[in-house]
Image: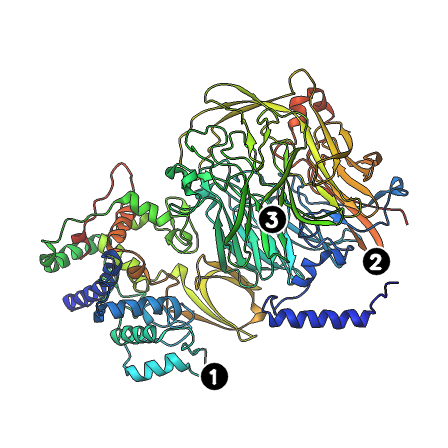
Amino acid sequence: MRVSKSMEWRRAMLAGVAAAALLFGGGSGAGQEPTREQTIAAGRRVFSGSCGMAYCHGNDAVGGGGPKLRGREFSAETLTRVINEGVPGTGMPAFKSNLKKEQVAQVVAYLLSVNKELPGAKPAAKVDPHFGGGAAPGPAEKLKAAEATRSVSAKPWTDAPAVSGDWQAGEQLFFDAADLGNCRVCHTVNGRGGAVASDLSRLSEKPPREILQRILAPQASLDGKYGMVALTLKNGERVAGILRDENAAGLRVYDTATLPPISRHYLKTEIAETRKLDASGCPGNYAAKFTLKQLLDMIAFLKTSDPAKPAVVSLRDLF
Amino acid sequence: MMVRPSASDLKIRRVMRAILLLLAGVIPVWGQEPTWDRLINSDREPQNWLSYGGNYNAHRYSALDQINRENVRQLAPAWIFQTGELRGGLNATPIVADGVMYLMGPMNRIFAINAATGEILWRYFYKLPNISIPYQAGSRGLAIGFGRVYFGTVNNHVVALDAKTGRELWDVEVEDVRQCGCNITSAPLIVKDKVIVGGTGGEHAHRGYINAYDAKTGRHAWRFYTIPGPGEPGSETWDPKMLKYGGAPAWLVGSYDPELNLLYWGIGNPSSDFYDEFRPGDNLYSNSIIALDPDTGKLKWHYQEVPHDMYDFDSAYECVLIDYEKDGRKQKLLVHPNKGGYTWVLDRATGKYVNAYPHVDTLTWLKGVDKNGRPVDMQPVPPDKETYVCPSAAGGRNWDHSSYSPKTRLWYNVGWEMCNVIKPQKMEIKEGQPLFGGSMTFIPPKGQAAYGHINGFDPLTGERKWRYLTRYLNVASLLSTGGDLVFSGDVMGEAFALDATTGKKLWSFNTGASVTGSPITYSVNGRQYVAVPTGMGSLVGGLATTIWPESEKAMPERASTLVVFALPR
């Protein structure tokens, strides 16, 4: 059980890494037919931008304001039709004028590839997403388990080139002021950054592999303090966001559908329905956004609590 | 004889225009009053003061003439309003629409006030985190439109409120103030469906920018960096290392020409202010006027006034758009007072140089300008040495704005005759940390006393029609009116009115607090009011006591008070 879960997770990770490798390696050569993996990765990117917002199908298609698409059986034909034509009477728009034919095919390929549940996705709160089953182990147990997992999976990587993260490059990436959609717009590390989502300063205590998982599949490590709600307003508008605060008169949510996040205030009298979402407000597109080297840099940064003792994180620490 | 259109004609016309604009997809359909159509045509309703500059040309002029040269002596307080927050005085330009005044006090306190009585309709105090605030706690103002109030905060957020109730609708952070050392101390500018905001940061290691947000949703629409990115045109005017830290903030408010669809913004100094060996080259677009497409944020043209600034001579001040007519020739001009005491005049369609003239008497940093308006023989300011430069880094005037009267066709501008000794010093560069690069000491011009003045200029030629000598340096904006008056106030607390054609002082009133903000005028139910913000809030307001030590004993205490005047009933 433990091994199979871990294998499944690794498969999900590899898909992410394949997407990252696309950028890392500069993509496929010109004129070549894209491989299935490349098509899926491209579909995932389109999905993240168009459909993966929390008030639609959610990161990694786990569901949000709209239905969950992960872990379901669809035919390519049905998916293509629904994406192109939409579903009248629901929130599902027709995408045929917004997406190219090729992009629709990519999204379909991606959705067909996610017919398995994310490891530990449900119920997220109780199950340790890392190893599955039972109560979440303490940090020491987790580390021990990580070691054990690594001993199983390490072999294929022993020959991998010794690529390691540069924490300063990671810090620059995290705080790059020119990127309006990077981590610092929501997260704080060591007193700098946004207050929209969790403070990541203590992430340095976690194993690199878990940090990678949290970056690539934020869905799998929901933090109750930054839970999402879906609001249906009396005027028919629908909004989803991270609940910021609430009082008798109204509430505020951080809308992360576009970045930078926007705090929105609603009066209770304006709201027809409030629903808690089992989803993360974190965009799930980092496997596509960052190269593998950049992810390593970022993890090295998050692992470095003392600049005098920079953490060394290499590729083999991730798998 | 001109036939006045009837009210119903006007209504039909307005509806037709609204339909046409809707078809063009220009104005938001969700909006309430005031609409974009009203904002951009604010000269049609002089009873209101709808935007920061009074109109989108930054004229700070109102056609109201109930208060005029003949009766201004009777002007007396009608009501007085206290913001209750003394940290930051009162810098703001009040905004008035349909009998309601929207006022931003310091620390982002916002009030809706009955503009005839001073009664509070609602208040909203922005919840600021416990952080140190860069630059100033006071704010220069807010914007209204579409039934909303928009403002930037001193911790670098942009916020929209419901104008009827003061309820917060949305709030978006521009950048963590702790990371950039920058914030928003000026009013946003609404252009069509967007809220456009600049920010501070010229004294920090920061890369300046202008941001546009969708006025309805708060979604980020575009960002224009005032320093090009690596490889972009203009980046060759910098040391590559400084592209991320060169300052050039857009810390005041732009202007907009709807015919040309061009947004004009003045850009501030490069960082560090004095020490310049970090940044060989012209350092674009610092100390420049830029013209942007407001729909996309794309640069249309730029004109740099002070290449490679070493004196803190920002070009951040207002871009005054003047349609100049003489001898049957019409020119679409942009008149721009630079902090260095020189005024540049550009063709605002093309950005081509037209003229430049000094608006102060004492200048050492340049010998003049060449045929393209580029300063000639700029004075070197070597590191670790003391150099005497005029005007001072506080400027040939400070930010408080000029005014243009289309009635007198004069441009009214303040001048300061004051110098400084600059000593540039190298500093460590760290993102978001101060990067001033030296020190300055304010001194009077050699061989004479410091003095200040208010002038009436021909805006194209710079020919001076009159000068009024001020007691100290004037740090309040000017307001001109159809009553042929120019209103302002001084740091000793006196609000005053000058004759707009001669500069003669016609009226004054001791408000009891330094006037360092921007007066406006408006009318409600046929009664004209003049609102004068008072309370020391200017960073350079305290200069008077440095130059004139004897002024200290009479300097008013801190305040944050709006004094509103009207003629007795």
Task: Assess disc 1: are there few (<14), some (14-19) or many (≥20) residues with their C-alpha within 10 Å of its C-alpha.
Answer: few
Q: Residue furthest top?
A: B447
CA gap, disc 3 and disc 1 = 45 Å
Give B443 or A209, whichever is nearer the viewer.
B443
CA gap, disc 1 and disc 2 = 50 Å
Amino acid type, label 2: Asn
Question: Mark 1 sits on what residue?
Answer: A89
Residue B245 found in image quarter: top left
Query: Relative to A17, is A166 above or below?
Result: above
Q: Compare marks 3 and 2 and give the one earlier in the sequence.
A: 3
Task: Assess disc 2: are there few (<14), some (14-19) or many (≥20) residues with their C-alpha within 10 Å of its C-alpha.
Answer: few
Q: Position of residue B373 (x, y in %)?
A: 58, 36
Residue shown at 67% from the left, 15% from the top? B447
Question: Mark 2 sits on what residue?
Answer: B525
Give B476 or B376, whichever is nearer the viewer.
B376
Q: Position of residue B199 (x, y in %)?
A: 54, 45
- Res A91 visible: yes
Tell me the SS state at disc 2. loop
Question: Mark 3 sits on what residue?
Answer: B254
Task: Assess disc 3: are there few (<14), some (14-19) or many (≥20) residues with their C-alpha within 10 Å of its C-alpha.
Answer: many
Query: Relative to B542, is A232 above or below?
Result: below
Q: Position of residue B280 (x, y in %)?
A: 42, 32
Quarter of the image for the N terminus of chain B: give it: bottom right
Tell me the SS state at disc 3. loop
Amino acid type, label 3: Gly
Amino acid type, label 1: Gly
